[in-house]
Amino acid sequence: MPFVPNTDAERAEMLRAVGASSVEELFSDIPEHLHIKGLDLPDGISEIEALNEVDSLAERNVQTKKMDWFLGAGAYYDYIPAAVPALAGRGEFLTAYTPYQPEVSQGTLQAIFEYQSMAAKLLGMSVVNASHYDGATALAEAVLMAWKARDGRNRILLPRELHPEYAQVIETYCTSFDIEFVRYGGAPENAPIDDKTAAIVIAYPNFSGEIYPVKKAADRAHEAGALCIVQADPLMCALMKSPGEQGADIVTAEGQSLGNPLNFGGPYLGIMGTTDALVRRMPGRIVGETKDKNGKRGFVLTLSTREQHIRREKAVSNICSNQGLSMLQTCIYLATLGKQGLREIARQSYDKAHYAAELIGGIPGYSVRSSQFFREFLVETPRAAAQIVRALGQRGIVPGFALSRYYPDRRNELLICVTEMNTRTQIERLAAALREASR
């Protein structure tokens, strides 16, 4: 609804009804020293001046289209078909709210149902919910879900090479819970799983780009009575074995690369899927297919009610409409590309990344640290990686992510990402620039 201001007469009538003589009296409980007397704002400017000011601010942004872009680390520059924003931007979707009443929300419910169906196939899971804020919060929710499902066990195993921001979000989520976090390095099948372990978290791939198989660790976890949680790259699942095929109980993923732009860091899309055995413990909403009294196909929220999210110790997080549009864009993206299109994009990312690694690994002073990787790989640099990033940035090349931003003792490590958007010329230009930067 458009904003309709109240007239002076209407405001006076409302004040009389509540027994107040003025609007200021409504705020009389707020101490005087906390009152703001006025804002020190500059005089207004014209529309032309405002637009010029906004344009000048926008020109300070780094634009991916004008750079040779090799930065990943959790946010990826992938191609988005024109159909995705065109359909997602239609008024029927932009103005829709959370689907409480199926009789007036069939379009939104069907979009969620189709998204869940495609995402479940991609991750190899029985069911996927209607999405979380981002990959980090989805993983934190998965940790809480596993901890509650394994009552009496309070140990969660986290890989050392988990994305540092994901680890921080998990720690924040679990501040008030009796959970012990144990970090492990290397292959997940060698993690210290025991009878106190509620779940092991596996990064597939990890923050450094390394890919470790899931099945052996999942089997070990199940033998010990623990659950296996996998934080996956969803695009990689189009090319390699999905976590579900390898025995994962819960799979989470960041869906930004599936049809959502970089957006300066958000909003993103937290994908979460699980097995039939755990479906009623999963937070968020699930849409099911049904038939109405006339036998026509219809869609409803199923398996959990709104009330389920407020049942004290049995409660789970109530994820509502916060990611409706991001989820919708991923739904349209997956439907537009289809199975073969998604596999082709994944294949291009894989092949181009390995071509780049081959070129860079042959430059004196550089060595590729990753052996099994998808689209990101770690490079040991001859000088501080942050210095190389700054030097190449002046030439219109963003060569990757300097790990010293998270790990001060890893000054000479550069995480390079290659997607289907990078051309052969760009990759060769990156290699030439890195060669020059080593001198």
Image (cartoon, rainbow, N blue to C red):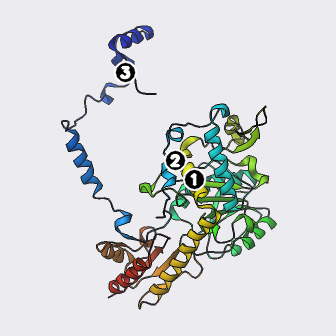
Residue at which label 1 appears: 332
Camera-nearest residue between 98 and 182? 98
Tell me the residue at 20%/44% (across/down): 49
The Cα atoms of the two marked residues, 2 and 1, are separated by 8 Å
Camera-nearest residue between 224 and 94? 94
Q: Position of residue 325 (x, y in %)?
A: 53, 46
From this view, report whether residue 330 is shown above or below residue 365. above
Say if mark 2 contacts mark 3, CB within 8 Å. no
* Residue type at tag 1: Ile
Q: Is 86 on the left-hand or right-hand side of 155?
A: left
Sequence-wise, the earlier of marks 1 and 3 is 3
Q: Position of residue 17 (x, y in %)?
A: 44, 8
Camera-nearest residue between 293 and 302? 293
State how many labels appear: 3
Q: Is residue 178 visible?
A: no
Residue at which label 3 appears: 5
Say if mark 2 contacts mark 1, CB within 8 Å. yes
User: Could you say which disc has been placed on residue 88 in the image?
Assistant: 2
Sequence-wise, the earlier of marks 2 and 3 is 3
Q: Quadrant of residue 433?
A: bottom left
Secondary structure under tag 2 reads helix
From this view, report whether residue 105 is shown above or below residue 374. above
